[in-house]
Amino acid sequence: MALMHVTEHRRETSADARTSRDELSPDALHKLLSELNARRLRPATPDTPPFFERDHRLAEIEERFLQRERAVIAERARQAPTNADEFVAWFESLEESGPGQHDPLFDWLANDADLPSMRWFLEQELAGEAGFDDLVALTQRKMDVTPKLELARNYWDEMGVGHEDGMHGPMLGRLAQELELDPVKHPIVWESIALGNLLMGLAYNRRYAYHSVGALGAVELTAPGRCVLVERGLARLGLSGAARRYYALHAVIDRKHSERWDRDVIKPLVAKDARLGRWIAEGALMRLEAGRRTFERYKRELGLSF
């Protein structure tokens, strides 16, 4: 145990030195934030070193990251309507007009990608997966009754409505096992790690609770179209139904989740307080912009010019 504490202290000292610099590369920044988020979520015991000072510094770095992401989309978010019905219509229109939507990368994955390319893509995607169940659980804390109930229903679906075989997270594990995915062999690009850090930063920090509502709503809204194409590509490449199940399921169920999210989470919140629409809009656009950035990086890494 003492040796573990010495090792952890050395890691903390190294992290402190890095985080004290004025500038961090995107790769270094997001590796640090992913370490912070892993520590936030991982069950631990009282003899686990707390590292309060380091986590405080990393939280400050996280805040600067989130503020930079907000600045990119702030002007567009301010254009969102304040009337609840009009806001929901605006939000739903992001499926067509939001950043990164209908990127040709996904048609290519469906129709042309070879197995190594598909494997690389999925390694990146799974590395950026923040765990929708945990994000929903974090977001629902102390929400109003109607939004909280819908978030609970969404969480229960993620949990396979109480059946281990239906849990969504392990479905990705079966896909990873069949494809023998190895993120160590193929380093993960920082854009993918940043996507997970963004979602966790919004969900974990209560001052961004409504941003998280928007970000997770954007996931439910836009995922089905991409999931259909990824599942089609996996079938074309001969993957089993069990391996494809996650994408096949989300191509369908997320449409229902999106409808209920708009009706029972977003609309009641904006109807109660129109000011919340701006923060929900920012969260949605931040998530979509982060996705757009990953798609652009994926295409460069895969040698695609469209």
Image (cartoon, rainbow, N blue to C red):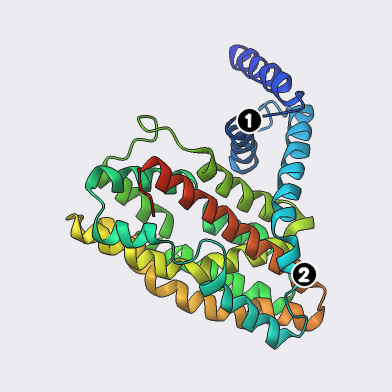
Q: Nearer the viewer, residue 15 or 52?
A: 15
The quarter holding residue 269 reads bottom right
Q: Residue at x 58, y 53 (%)?
A: 290
Mark sitting earlier along the chain (1/2): 1
* Left-right relation of 6 to 303: right
Residue 142 visible, this orientation = no
Q: Nearer the viewer, residue 52 or 107?
A: 107
- In the rendered view of the protein, which quadrant contains the C terminus? bottom left
Where's residue 253, x and y in %? 42, 73
Where's residue 85, x and y in %? 69, 88
Where's residue 107, x and y in %? 33, 63
* Left-right relation of 78 to 262: right
Q: Is residue 77 above or below residue 11?
A: below
Q: Is residue 9 above or below residue 161?
A: above
- In this view, which residue lies farthest toward the front? 305
Instruction: Name the kind of residue labelled 1 in the image.
Output: Ser
- In the rendered view of the protein, which quadrant contains the N terminus? top right
Instruction: Name the kind of residue labelled 2 in the image.
Output: Arg
Q: Is residue 301 above or below residue 23?
A: below
Q: Which mark is residue 7?
A: none
- In this view, which residue lies farthest toward the left? 238
Q: Residue at x 27, y 40 (%)?
A: 180
Question: What residue is pinned by disc 1?
Answer: 25
* Left-right relation of 151 to 52: left
Q: Residue at x 64, y 58 (%)?
A: 286
Question: What residue is pinned by disc 2?
Answer: 78
Q: Nearer the viewer, residue 218 or 301?
A: 301
